[in-house]
Image (cartoon, rainbow, N blue to C red):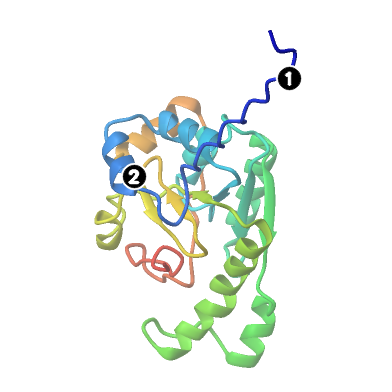
Amino acid sequence: MSLDIIRQTPPEPAAPTFHAGADLIALNSQFRNNKPSEIIRFSIEQAKNPIIFTNFRPMAIAFLHLATQFKQNIPVIWVDHGFNTPETYRHISRVVEYLNLNLQVYSPKMSAAHYTAVHGPIPPLDTPAHDLFSRIVKLEPFDRAMADFAPDIWLNGIRHDQNAYRKDLHIFTFGSHGTVRVAPMFHLAEADVEKYILDRDLPDNLDYFDPTKGEEHRECGLMMRQ
C-alpha cells in the first residue's frame, strides 16, 4: 500500500448567482410567487456585496424594515439632493435610529444653495436644464456611491403599480455599473405595503418631494439607467 499523500483537486468555486450574464428570466420565474422576505433572504445570501438604495419616500420604511432583518449592517445608500422637505430630514433621523441603519449619505458636489444661487430655482420638467439638474443632484452622487461600494446587487423598494415604466420591470433586472437590481416588493400592491406599516406601527414619511421627478408617477433617472 502506498503511503504517498493523495492530493485531491479542490472543487471549483460555485459560479456567482448575480453577474452581468445572469439568467434573470429564470430567476424571475422562480421567485414570481415568493414572499418579499424569501426574495431578500436569497438575494443577500447569494450576493457578494449587496447594498440598499433608498430615498425615504412614503412607505419606504416597510422595505427598509424588512430588508435589514436579514443583514443588519448592510450599507444603506441615500442620495441627499438637498431639496428635501424639513419633515423628510426629521423622518430620516428617526428611521436611522429606529432601525439602526448603516446609512451612507452621498450629496452632490454642488449644494442646493449653491445650485440655486448659480442656476436659479429647480428648472421645468422635460427640459435640458432639468436634465442637467438631475445629473448634478442625483446621478453624479449615485455614480460615486456605486464606484465606492462596487456592489453586485442593489436592493430597492419599487413596485409594479407605481408608474407605467415600472409596470414592465421585474423582481430582478439588470442595472447600471454591471449590477443586478432586486425589487423584493415588486408584485405587492400599495395596500399590502400600507398594511405592513400599520400592523407594525412603523414611522412613515408623508411630506416628501423629489425634485428630479416633480410628479409622483414620473420615473426617476436611476431606474432608467442600464
Which quadrant holds residue 73?
Answer: top right
Residue at x 44%, y 52% (from the top left corner): 181
Pick whichever of labels 2 and 1 is earlier in the sequence: 1
Locate residue 28, reporting x and y percent: 30, 42
State the mark number for residue 186. 2
Q: Is residue 188 visible?
A: yes
Judge from the rendering whether residue 106 lies leftward or rightward of residue 194; answer left or right: right
Q: Nearer the viewer, residue 39 or 217?
A: 39
Q: Secondary structure at mark 2?
A: loop
Q: Which mark is residue 214?
A: none
- In which quarter of the view is residue 114 placed? bottom right
Query: Who's the residue at 62% across and 31% down the image?
Result: 10
Q: How many marks?
A: 2
Q: Return the residue at label 1.
A: 5
Question: Dot 1: what SS?
Answer: loop
209 above or below 121? above
Observer-nearest of 158 and 44: 44
Question: With 9 as the anchor, is 190 left or right in this view?
Answer: left
In this picture, is 84 found above or below 35? below
Vertical relation: 15 (above or below) 167: above
Q: Is residue 18 above or below residue 212?
A: above
Marks 2 & 1, CB-CB < 8 Å contact? no
